[in-house]
Structures are given as structure tokens and as C-alpha cells.
Image (cartoon, rainbow, N blue to C red):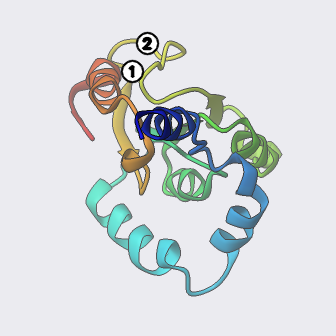
Amino acid sequence: MLYYFAMHKKIMDKKKTSWGEVGDWYQRLLQGEGTYQKEVILPNLLRLLEIQKGETILDLASGPGFFSQEFLKKGAKVIGADIAKELIEIAKSNVQEDQRGRILYFVSPADDLKFLKDESVDKAVIVLAIQNMENVQGVFNECGRVLKENGKL
């Protein structure tokens, strides 16, 4: 019995939680009509963020960049980060020539944003992803570090 629990724990410790393996499917889902992300989350997220032209928004667990692209349309400079390199590759492939420099993507865990300077971000979002992150306290610590004074998460 003890062996069973030890093996089960070993298997569970190695369980993959990355969305990278389903990146193409997720991209197609987000581009579809009538999705929860597009019809419910996006309008409310934009309302809550009250994006001002020129603000810098950090999109943690950005996936293929669906929300990042929408923030860019509102005039923000956007930084997307996701641990799944496959999703970041999709996001980068969606960046248009005229968007370069205003939207950047990084492969990075949300609890280690060493590519960002202290107090360099106006607002940060984590949409439908915090439940997939192991070091939640580390994520919040990094958000606190990179957010400007009076920044919003």
C-alpha cells in the first residue's frame, strides 16, 4: 500500500500542466465566434482595465496572445509571457509588422520575470491561469516588483 502511494505521488509530481501541447487547438478556439473568452471575459476585462494609450500591460500566461492583441488595439504597449514555448511561438507569429516593438512575448514562468525591470509595468493580468501555477506567492511577488507605484493587478 505504501508503495502504491509513493508511485502515485511520483507520477503526479511529473504531471504536465502546460498548454503547449494543445496550442493550435487553443488558438483556433480563441479565434472562433461566441467563445467565453471573447463574449464574457474580454469586454469585462477591458472595462476593468480602463486602458490608457501608452500604458504598459503585462499579460501573464498570455498563451497565444488573444488578450494581448486586444490590449494593443486599445493603445497599450503589451508584454506577454507564458511558460509554454509553443504558445509564445504562436503569439509571435500573430504579430503584424506595424505592431513590432509595441508587443513583445517571452517564454518565462510567471514567478521569474527577470526580463522586466522593477516598476516598469502599469497593469498586469492573469486570465484563467493562476490555478495552473505552482508558486503563486512567487507570481504575486514578481507582480509587486514589476508594477509601478499605484499599478494594478
Q: Which residue is rendered at x = 32% and y = 28% of the image?
A: 143
Name the residue type under label 2: Lys
Task: Mark yes or no: residue 63 visible.
Answer: yes
Q: Which residue is mark 1?
A: 120
| Image position of 139 (left or right of 23) | left
Which quadrant holds the N terminus?
top left
Position of residue 121 measured from the top left corner of the image (x, y, whole percent): 38, 28
Vertical position of residue 126 compared to residue 80: above or below:
below
Helix, strand or loop at mark 1: loop
Hey, which residue is sitting farthest bottom in the picture?
Answer: 34
Q: Distance from label 2 to label 1 (Cα)?
A: 6 Å
Position of residue 152 measured from the top left corner of the image (x, y, whole percent): 24, 39
Q: Which residue is rendered at x = 48% and y = 20% of the image?
A: 113
Helix, strand or loop at mark 2: loop
Q: Are marks 2 and 1 in contact (CB under 8 Å)?
A: yes
| Image position of 95 (left or right of 37) | right
Q: Residues within 10 Å of mark 2 (few under 14, many from 20)?
A: few
Q: Which residue is mark 2?
A: 117
Q: Report how many numbered discs are placed on residues in the image.
A: 2
